Image (tube, helix red, strand yellow):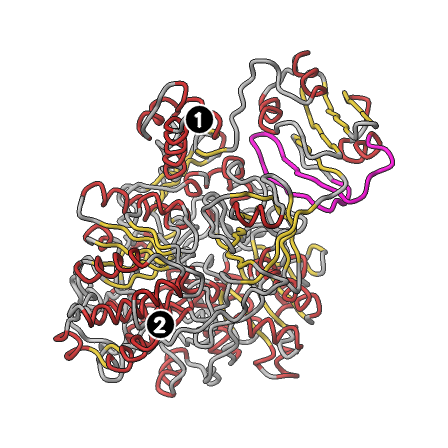
């Protein structure tokens, strides 16, 4: 079998990949050098996709209340449950909650079923948590949800302003493209605006650590500065925009001077002035924004404040300039195209009477929804109240990812009918389900996705469907047929769905709507299978897709863009004496969403094996926190327990906790349980970046860890974090109750004691035990009442050996590596498993001074490149240490 060209299932960059058959049925995943999104580049997650293709943990058969069922039984149960609920309480008593992990064809049929035939708009997507504010901001300004840029603009720009975007970790291939652009263009300047000094700051010429929630004020100040410096494009403003006067007046009133802006934003005056000067004098400017802008109660206003400065300077519709929203998920854009959001209908149409009539006629429906449905937070509020009595959740894990996550869990546990279709058997959300439907996973699915630059690419299957798993489009279509709508859902392939989706985009369009892919509405199955990546719009007859807004025409009623006044607003929740710190959430480099896929990869789990909280050194001293301790992070409604990292990458008064860990991988680390469900009043997107919390040292009675070749069934502990290593599972543990006997406790963890070597020091409060079968280490556990525990790294190396030496046995009992053994330290380069300690030894011992030298010596940084910012940080740390006086 030859390589299959497909598309990455992670972030919105939409990288092309090649899946190549390897040995023993495995697949190697490589970047596709011909794909225009990445030209062969990949990130650490994409490079490790081959590690995630196994079937352990998969949902392979339908289940009803925990018992295996046939597809007929499961689908009939769902169809009858939904039909009964609708008959008794109306169509608004049911809802779908879908996902940017779905393919466009899956999304299309789910939206059509709910809005066109059930007759309710109660379908929303987890993209509501991601890019809804960008959608709302674009629509207010342009009259359409049009991202006006493509990736080549990053390479043509002379100034890139990154706002609330950790490009290095969240969109690594775009980071690589910007890094290469800087090397090729010495004039290119990068400015980073972010509360945290993330790894993206490595390429920034100017870093502005803005106070959370003050982005609107910063860009209002820029708009007023542009007026004062005569840097406006008056001709463009007059011919192609409306609303400048009001927007400018609001900007002047809220941001009267640079000193006032700097004070309110927590910035240096010189840095604010430098940003303003660079923006004013650089025509080719792209402003890239992501979750730090969108995930806010004022997210839509933040977007419009950014768009305003581009409209005021005419920097839109031309190469190398524009306000560029980069999406978080692989198909967030595709979901927007088909109407996956509750306030959209389909094909970028809304709920105006004309649009409702048009879509209803196209679908042949007499019950098409005529008004918006419930957005994500509202939807789960309605589940909690009991007004939504049946919900179908597709390919997402809201019990971890939604704000006020514990309330979401309770709501689902009380709901009359919860259906979950997923490829993973055990998630926080599947635990709440009455019916489970096994869905196809990434390598088994075929369809299309749309990336952040409006580029539609094929995702192609290269693996057979395992067990009884089925594609999402098939599951939705089969349900529609059982609900009596079979005539409208007579699809036999994703290609048939795609053709209908494309026809709807062109139906009665005539250039009135931005989204039009009529040119591909009549593809044959073979042409669909061979479809090459392309950008929309692509109307029938178009030879070259037009650059959005190049002609100065927008999709508003007047045809002119709107500058929207953006008065600053404070975050919905502010710090207090009880909760004095501001919690920010986000991603880490090597994990994705709730880890259902990336958590399966040993090389991705080495970078951060546990959930953590990052605290500034001043706050650590203030609250008595020590590096490596456990901490309780608490809000008014919930608490979590995570490991402490002390770093000046967060500002004093701020903390950062990643969003990935749910109950499957940690006992109590669902950070979204700490975040209230406050939303942007326009977009409905929740505030996920500014929750008030407190942080206290968590001091259990004992600490421990276990390593094992096979998964362990552990007794209940107050702290547990699970990760996967190369040939072993790792468990970090702590407890508030001391067992009567550590050897007996270890029996429950490790099994029979006959094959065990152990040391039990009752007086010292220590226990060490290891199960050895023949000469092979099978599992070990270490516990102590003090915090000090042996290094996991050298113990982990023993699981790569089939012979345990006498020195190894003594070392296990002694709790330290044999003499001469070298620690690798925490993983920095995931591709080649190169640790921090290994890198530092090479840097200092071999006097390495560049990333290139490190690559030649250790290979670190030579594959996906995602670790290069950290390697540069270690080089700088070593250089600073060498320069310091003794």
**The residue tagged with tag 1: helix, strand or loop?**
helix
Q: Which residues are magenta?
A: 714-742
At x 41%, y 52%, the residue is: 11
Q: CA distance from mark 2 to mark 1?
A: 46 Å
Which residue is disc 1 drawn over?
840
| Pointers 2 and 1 in contact (C-beta within 8 Å) | no
For the question of whether residue 71 can be seen, the reply is yes
Is residue 731 on the magenta stretch?
Answer: yes
Q: Residue 271 at x, y = what percent?
A: 30, 55
Residue wearing tag 2: 137
Q: Give the mark nearer the N terminus: 2 vs 1.
A: 2
Query: In the displayed structure, would residue 527 be above or below residue 621?
Result: below
User: As displayed, is residue 149 above or below residue 80?
Assistant: above
The outermost residue toward the bottom is: 353
Q: From the viewer's perspective, is residue 154 above or below residue 242?
A: above
Looking at the image, residue 832 sits to the left or right of residue 422; the answer is left
Q: From the viewer's perspective, tell me whether residue 672 is left or right of residue 558.
A: right
Q: Nearer the viewer, residue 1 or 186?
A: 186
How far across and how far down the image is residue 513, in percent?
Answer: 28, 76
Instruction: Tell which residue pokes out farthest to the top in this image.
Output: 806
Tell me the SS state at disc 2.
helix
Q: 753 or 370, which lies in front?
A: 753
Q: Nearer the viewer, mark 2 or mark 1?
A: 1
């Amino acid at each position: 079998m030859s390589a299959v060209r497909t598309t990455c299932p992670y972030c919105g960059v939409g990288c092309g990949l090649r899946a190549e058959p390897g040995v023993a049925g495995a697949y190697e995943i490589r970047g596709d050098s011909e794909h225009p999104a990445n030209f062969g580049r990949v990130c650490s997650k994409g490079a490790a996709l081959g590690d995630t293709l196994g079937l352990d943990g998969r949902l392979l058969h339908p289940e009803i209340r925990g018992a295996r069922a046939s597809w007929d039984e499961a689908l009939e149960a769902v169809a009858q449950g939904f039909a009964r609920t609708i008959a008794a309480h109306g169509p608004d008593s049911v809802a779908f909650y879908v996902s940017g992990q779905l393919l466009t064809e899956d999304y299309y049929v789910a939206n059509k079923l709910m809005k066109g035939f059930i007759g309710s708009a109660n379908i929303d997507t987890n993209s509501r948590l991601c890019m809804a504010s960008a959608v709302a901001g674009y629509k207010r300004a342009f009259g359409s949800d049009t991202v006006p840029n493509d990736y080549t603009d990053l390479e043509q720009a002379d100034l890139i302003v990154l706002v609330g975007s950790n490009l290095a970790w969240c969109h690594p291939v775009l980071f690589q493209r910007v890094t290469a652009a800087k090397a090729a263009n010495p004039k290119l300047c990068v400015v980073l605006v972010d509360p945290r000094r993330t790894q993206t700051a490595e390429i920034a010429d100017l870093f502005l650590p803005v106070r959370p929630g003050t982005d609107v004020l910063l860009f209002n100040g820029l708009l007023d500065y542009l007026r004062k410096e005569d840097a406006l494009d008056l001709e463009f403003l007059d011919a192609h925009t409306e609303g400048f006067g009001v927007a400018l007046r609001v900007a002047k009133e809220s941001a009267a001077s640079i000193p006032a802006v700097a004070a309110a934003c927590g910035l240096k005056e010189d840095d604010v002035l430098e940003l303003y000067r660079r923006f004013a004098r650089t025509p080719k400017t792209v402003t890239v924004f992501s979750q730090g802008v969108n995930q806010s109660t004022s997210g839509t206003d933040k977007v419009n404040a950014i768009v305003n400065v581009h409209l005021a300077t005419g920097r839109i519709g031309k190469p190398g300039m524009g306000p560029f929203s980069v999406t978080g998920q692989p198909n967030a854009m595709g979901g927007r195209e088909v109407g996956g959001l509750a306030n959209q209908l389909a094909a970028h149409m809304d709920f105006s009477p004309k649009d409702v009539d048009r879509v209803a006629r196209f679908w042949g429906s007499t019950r098409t929804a005529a008004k918006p449905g419930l957005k994500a937070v509202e939807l789960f509020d309605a589940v909690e109240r009991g007004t939504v009595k049946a919900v179908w959740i597709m390919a997402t894990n809201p019990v971890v990812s939604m704000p006020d996550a514990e309330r979401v869990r309770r709501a689902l546990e009380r709901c009359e009918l919860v259906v979950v279709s997923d490829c993973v058997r055990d998630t926080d959300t599947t635990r709440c389900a009455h019916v489970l439907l096994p869905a196809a996973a990434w390598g088994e699915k075929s369809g299309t996705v749309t990336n952040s630059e409006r580029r539609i690419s094929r995702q192609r299957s290269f693996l057979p469907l395992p067990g009884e798993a089925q594609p999402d489009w098939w599951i939705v279509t089969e349900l529609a047929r059982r609900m009596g709508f079979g005539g409208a859902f007579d699809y036999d392939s994703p290609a048939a769905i795609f053709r209908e989706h494309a026809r709807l985009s062109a139906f009665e369009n005539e250039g009135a709507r931005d989204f039009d892919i009529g040119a591909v509405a009549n593809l044959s199955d073979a042409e669909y299978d061979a479809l090459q990546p392309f950008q929309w719009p692509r109307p029938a007859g178009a030879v070259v897709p037009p650059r959005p807004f190049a002609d100065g025409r927008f999709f508003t009623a007047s045809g002119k863009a709107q500058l929207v006044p953006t008065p600053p607003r404070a975050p919905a929740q502010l710090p207090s004496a009880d909760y004095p710190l501001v919690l920010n959430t986000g991603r880490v480099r090597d994990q994705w969403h709730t880890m259902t896929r990336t958590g399966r990869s040993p090389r991705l789990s080495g970078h951060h094996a546990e959930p953590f909280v990052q605290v500034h050194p001043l706050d650590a001293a203030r609250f008595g926190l020590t590096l490596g301790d456990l901490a309780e992070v608490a809000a008014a409604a919930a608490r979590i327990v995570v490991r402490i990292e002390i770093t000046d990458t967060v500002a004093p008064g701020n903390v950062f906790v990643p969003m990935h860990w749910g109950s499957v991988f940690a006992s109590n680390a669902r950070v979204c349980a700490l975040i209230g469900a406050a939303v942007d009043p326009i977009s409905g997107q929740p505030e996920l970046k500014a929750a008030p919390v407190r942080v206290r040292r968590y001091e259990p009675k004992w600490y421990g860890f276990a390593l094992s070749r096979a998964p362990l069934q552990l007794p209940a502990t107050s702290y547990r974090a699970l990760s996967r290593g190369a040939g072993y599972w790792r468990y970090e543990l702590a407890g508030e109750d001391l067992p009567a006997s550590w050897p007996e406790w270890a029996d429950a963890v490790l099994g029979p004691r006959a094959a065990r070597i152990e040391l039990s020091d009752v007086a010292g409060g220590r226990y060490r035990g290891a199960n050895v079968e023949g000469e092979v280490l099978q599992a070990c556990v270490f516990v102590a009442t003090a915090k000090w525990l042996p290094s996991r790294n050298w113990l982990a190396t023993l699981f790569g050996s089939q012979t345990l030496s006498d020195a190894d046995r003594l070392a296990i009992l002694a709790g330290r590596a044999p003499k001469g053994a070298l620690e690798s330290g925490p993983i920095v380069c995931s591709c080649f498993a190169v640790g921090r300690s290994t890198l530092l030894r090479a840097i200092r011992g071999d006097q390495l001074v560049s990333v290139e030298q490190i690559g030649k010596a250790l290979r670190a940084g030579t594959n996906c490149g995602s670790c290069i910012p950290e390697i540069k940080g270690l080089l700088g740390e070593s250089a600073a240490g060498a320069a310091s006086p003794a």
